[in-house]
Structures are given as structure tokens and as C-alpha cells.
Image: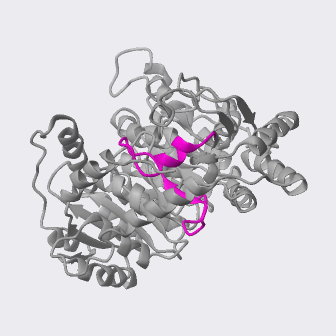
Amino acid sequence: MKTSELLVHCLEAEGIEYIFGVPGEENADFMIALEQSDSIRFILTRHEQGAAFMAEAYGRLTGNPAVCLGTLGPGATNLMTGVANANMDRVPMLVLTGQGATTRLHKESHQIMDVVAMFKPVTKWNASIRHPSAVPEIVRKSVRLARSEKPGVCHIELPEDIAKMETDEQPMQPHRYPHPVANSDQIEVAFSMLRHAKRPVILAGNGCIRRNASGELRRFCEITGIGVVSTFMAKGCVDMDADYCLYTIGLQARDVVACALDAADLVITLGYDMVEYHPLLWNAASNKHIIHIDSCPAEIDAHYQPELELIGDLPHTLATINADIERLGAVTRNLSQQSNTRQRMQQELLQHAGDETEQTIRPQKALADVRKVLGPSDILLSDVGAHKMWIARHYHCHEPNTCLIPNGFCSMGFALPGAIGAALVHPDRRILAICGDAGFMMNVQEMETARRLNSNIVVMVWEDHAYGLIAWKQQNQFGHHTDLGFGNPDWMQLSGAFGWHGHRVEKSVELQDALNTAFTESGPSLIVIPIDYRENMKLSERLGNIVCSI
């Protein structure tokens, strides 16, 4: 068989289900080989960036890698943003790019560039296949590294002449290895620190929604009553209705939730990535007592110097601590601050949630309606922009991986293609993407992909005719903002042109009904609302006046 056929068989052996992408001349042999696969489905996209975002959503929801594909040159460069986004958000994913023949890589030649070197900064590992016999090992290594904590992206390049070579090699069979666990003596030290703490708090990060860590975290909280502050990407690690849920932290401004961290005499970080929320913002004096529990050692930072690090499988570490607590018992703690924090944040969440007579639609009201319409296991995908800040603060979850927010690399354009990927994983759930008008237009071409696949998704566009988040930040810093306005298409004509259902909602009282209607429609639906971003500066003023009470 050809090397290209061997590559397909190796991906099949690894359980790859989807490849998203835009083929080119240099990976034609691979595409012809892929056509014969019974277990891998190829999804043709309208842009390589969209392909990467679809693969990212798949990886976040399943914990297994999908593949995004592009050809050499511009095909590879178009993948870069989505690849970087997935890698920094700790998502397992494979990237497969074509390349010119090895006989011309050493010289100036049409579309030739060093793709492997280009992808190196935004992947965990990458390699160019230079001999057919290397394919099984390269694929096995790529998938293992992509899945291993912390997950990320691995890149494979296949030159066109290598793809045509004959080979007798066979795929390697995958073997899963046991995850390393934390040292038991160190766990005992952590248990002792926990017993002596009077006001401990948990800062839960992205790692808490992987490998079923959420279940052990909830068990820990039920036993101890200790409150959980989560980063944006850890939403749903504990149920929003639980008394120990202290909601999310991550705005650059001081928020109500920061009071719980201020008052804590011990911060237990679980699966915490400082790419989401830098410790300078919650440990400015570098004086917090910190226990770092994660699969990897703590990042070196002057404001993050844990006294103890428990490195190993996160669910196993929590399970061991839980067993100790159940055996030896917990101690009485002062939970007044976390109770106060939760109550104050609940009051914030209720502001404007009941606006029914307003002629404008505030972010708080829009998200309150979304929460009412979506069930506990339904999925919201947020794009990046001012709306992301509101979603992060005001939309909360019952289950892990039911709110997907890019918060490491923070690329705009994620939500629409991401929703298409999510609908492939969970066709039985309601899938809602919320985008700003700027982010939506960055990958608007994937409306055709959604229509072709008949994806049952709803996309809500918050229209403000501007790069709203940049305006918000410039206004905060300088007292005014530069010209950030732009025009938009006629949204209803746009939705009709792509074969989507279309709804424009002007009044807050009509939004919930429009959402329910959209979710009963077959295929993709677009809802556009004019958003009242006067609330942005009002929120900034309120956050600037927050005083923590004991």
C-alpha cells in the first residue's frame, strides 16, 4: 500500500473519527486514501481556521483528538490561529499538512516554507514524515502526546512524494498507560495543612473539567463545604446551584468573587493554568499559602510560589484526600466570607435578569433568558469580545464542558465553527453559539458548512457595530476610545442567502420565545439582537467600588 494509505490506517487504529479541513494538491494522495475509510469522516470546511476550531470543540467535549487538515503554504498558515488556540486551551488535536516533494525542500520553490518550524511554537510536538517506515511511530507518538496531560496539539507533515511511496508497514496498536499519581506522603502534608486552615478556598482551573476530576471535586466540597472559585474554562466543575459554588473569576478588574480569595488563609489550586488568570491579580503581595494540585509542576512566577505541590493524576489525588477526610474527619471552618460572596454575586446576577419592559436588551437579560432556555447538559459556546466578559460573569453551569470559552489564546471566530463541531459530538443537545458581530463575521463562511451538514445549532449575534471589548478597555484606560465602528450586512438577508432560519429580536420581552422557536427549527438558525453595551462602563464603575465585608 501507499504511505498515504498507511497513514489513514494508523489514524483509524487510534480511533480518529473526524478530519476537518480544506484539501490541496499536495495532499491529494491522502484524500483519495481517506475516501476508502469506513470509520473516519471527512468534513469539508470553507476555511482552514474553521476546520481547526471544529476540531478543537470536538477535542474539548470528548477528550480525544480530531484532525484538522490543510495543504502546504497558505493552507498551513490559515490553520495557525485555530491550532494555537487549541494548544493554549489544553485541547487534544492533530494537525495534518501537506508539503512539496522532498526533492525541492532545500531550495526556493513554489509555496515551499518550513511548516514544521512554523508550527513548533504552537504545538506540543511535530514531525515531518521523511520515510514510510516512520508513519506508525509518528502517529502513535502524536496521539499519545496530544492526549497526555496537559493535552495539546501535535502536527504531522506529509510531503507529496513520500505519500506515494509503497510500504509494507502496519499500524501500531494503541496502548494506554496508567497516569502517574501524587506522592502519598505529600498528600498527608496537604491534608494536615487543610485541617489547620480556617478559611480555605479552592481556585479551580481548566484541568478540573478533564478526566472526570469534577466528580471528586464535588465530593470534596460536599464533605468539607469549602467554596470553589473557577476560571472561565472551569465553568461547571461544580454545580452552579451548590452552596459552595462561588462562581467565576477572570475579569481584569476586581470583582465580588475576589473577596473570597482575599480572605482565604489557604488557596488550593486545582488544574490551574495561569494563562487564564494571572496570580498577580489575586496574590499581588505574594503572601498567600498555596497548595498546587495538578498533573504538572507549577509554572515559575514571583506571585505563584506554592508551599506544596501534589503532582499527578488530579482525580486520584482528590480521591485520596477525600478518603483521608472521611476517615479522620474535617474541622470546623469559618465559611461566612464565602457565604457572603455567593449571596452578593447572586444579587449581581439578578440585576436586569427580569427586564421585560425595556426597549433595549441588556447583556444580563440576554444571558438570563439563555440560561432558562438551555438545559443542564446543553452547550453554550462563547466567541471572544465584550460578550465573553458577560458570559464569563453571568452565565453559570450545572455540568462540566457545557460552556466552552477560549481563554488562553483567546481567538475571535471560534464560536460558529466550534458549534458545528459540538453538534457532531452531541446531536441530541441544544447547541448555542454567542458571538459579537465582529467575531461572527470572521468565520461567516462556515454558515455554508453548517447548512450543508444540516447542523442543529443556534447562533446568537450581539450587534453593536463595533469592536466592543477594545472600546470598553480603551475607555477604561484613557477615558475615550479610538474609531472602532463598522457596518454590518442585512442579517436576515444573510441568513436567507445561506439557507438558515433568521430572527431579529428588538425587545427583551421577545428574546426567550425567539430562542425556543429557533431550537425547534430543523437545521441552523440565526438570532440577532441589538445589545445595550452601555452596561459595560456601568459594570466597570461598580467593580471599581467593590468593598469586601467579613
Find residue 173 and report its horizontal and vertical position in percent: 78, 46
| Residue 245 lies in the magenta-colored region | yes
Find residue 447 and report its horizontal and vertical position in percent: 30, 63
Residue at image location 76% in from the left, 49% down from the top: 318
In the picture as drawn, the residue positioned furthest to the right comes out as 327
Magenta stretch prevailing secondary structure:
loop
Where 269 sits versus 134, above or below? below
Residue at image location 74% in from the left, 60% down from the top: 219
Foreground residue, 455 or 250? 250
Foreground residue, 130 or 85? 85
Q: Is residue 35 at all visible to an observer of this figure?
A: no
Where 356 sits versus 457, above or below? below
Where 265 sits versus 511, above or below? above
Find residue 362 and report its horizontal and vertical position in percent: 24, 67
Where 342 sits versus 202, above or below? below
Find residue 518 and report its horizontal and vertical position in percent: 33, 80
In the image, the segment drawn in magenta is 237-265
Whether residue 178 sits left or right of residue 83 in the image: it is right
Whether residue 137 sits left or right of residue 244 in the image: it is right
The image quarter in which residue 226 lies = bottom right
Residue at image location 55% in from the left, 71% down from the top: 377
For the N terminus, give its image quadrant. top right
The image quarter in which residue 535 lies = bottom left
